[in-house]
Image (cartoon, rainbow, N blue to C red):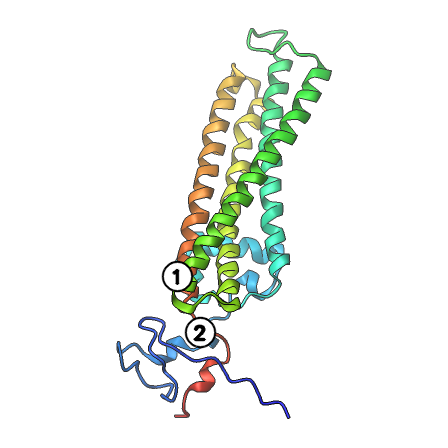
Amino acid sequence: MTQSKEPPPLRCEHCRYDLTGLKRSDNCPECGTPIEGFRATFRPGTPMQQSPTWRAWFNTARIALTDLPRWYREMSPQLDHFWRLDTRNHLAVLLGSLVTLVAIWMTVLIQEWNSVRSPYGTGMDREMIFFTGMYIVAMLVGVTLAAYLALRALTLLVGWILIARMNGWNAASRRRALNASVHGANVACGIFLLSQTIALIPTGLTALIESLFADPEYAAMVWFVIAGGGAVAAVFGMLIFTINSSVVLRRANLPGSEARLADD
């Protein structure tokens, strides 16, 4: 006859004191923090943990950028649907790269359209523009995805080290590190996709209102500042949010841990 699995311990998320046997209405004997706030049921999970949809993915990134305490407070140490969630991060990077490419291509086309009336045109024919654009597509998407995967590997390693130093090098620590990495990437990819989309504005306006930028290089300069700034912000965002998520998740209690408490 198989024995039921023992519930995980409930620990104080501030000092890591084992709260087994105490009542829900008690305070932590070590630091005095109310136990009620440490119950795993108070961590319902971020929107994308509850439902792995694109809408939940965007809502999770929005909460992280507008209501950070809530983002940390709701994050659960459990991570279901890992691959479905992480696929959305990969697709967001790919879409951001393609949006950036559209901006570059629009600038080249605008220069060509103005080449008859302006000294700023490239003088390239349509076939050269097409193949130049295809080359930029492959190069930009490849470099962006490679940089993203390298950064993800780095943040995952850092998160795992932070979590394992407290909880040990085991499968549970690895899952928590993956969880922190996915959430950090969610915020970073949201920043990247948003910034690249906003960067389309100067080139788009130049295409619609040619007089806005007599020299399309000005539009390219504005695009570069916005797109480049967004990419840098995304890199730092992934590092910061992954590390902070790791610190939060290494102390978070697992669902079922409240069973270790005594009845009031």
Extreme residue toward the right, this view:
127
Secondary structure under the numbered disc 1 in the rendered image? helix
Question: Residue 126 or 17: which is nearer the viewer?
Answer: 17
Question: Residue 175 or 86: which is nearer the viewer?
Answer: 175
Residue 66 horizontal/vertical position (percent): 42, 53
Task: Give the amino acid type for the residue marked by disc 1 in the picture.
Answer: Val
Q: Which mark sits nearer the N-terminus, 1 or 2?
A: 1
Q: Name the residue under label 1.
A: 247
Task: Count neighbours of disc 2 (C-alpha within 10 A) and say few if under 14, some if 14 to 19, many if 20 or more.
Answer: many
Residue at the spot 44% in from the left edge and 60% down from the top edge:
71
Which mark is drawn over residue 121?
A: none
Say if mark 1 contacts mark 2, CB within 8 Å: no
Residue at the spot 73% in from the left edge and 16% down from the top edge:
127
Query: Which quadrant of the figure has residue 55?
Result: bottom right
Residue at the spot 38% in from the left edge and 67% down from the top edge:
166
Number of marks: 2
Above or below 189: residue 16:
below
Quadrant of the rendering where the C terminus is positioned:
bottom left
Which mark is drawn over residue 253?
A: 2
Residue 98 horizontal/vertical position (percent): 62, 35
Residue 45 horizontal/vertical position (percent): 51, 67
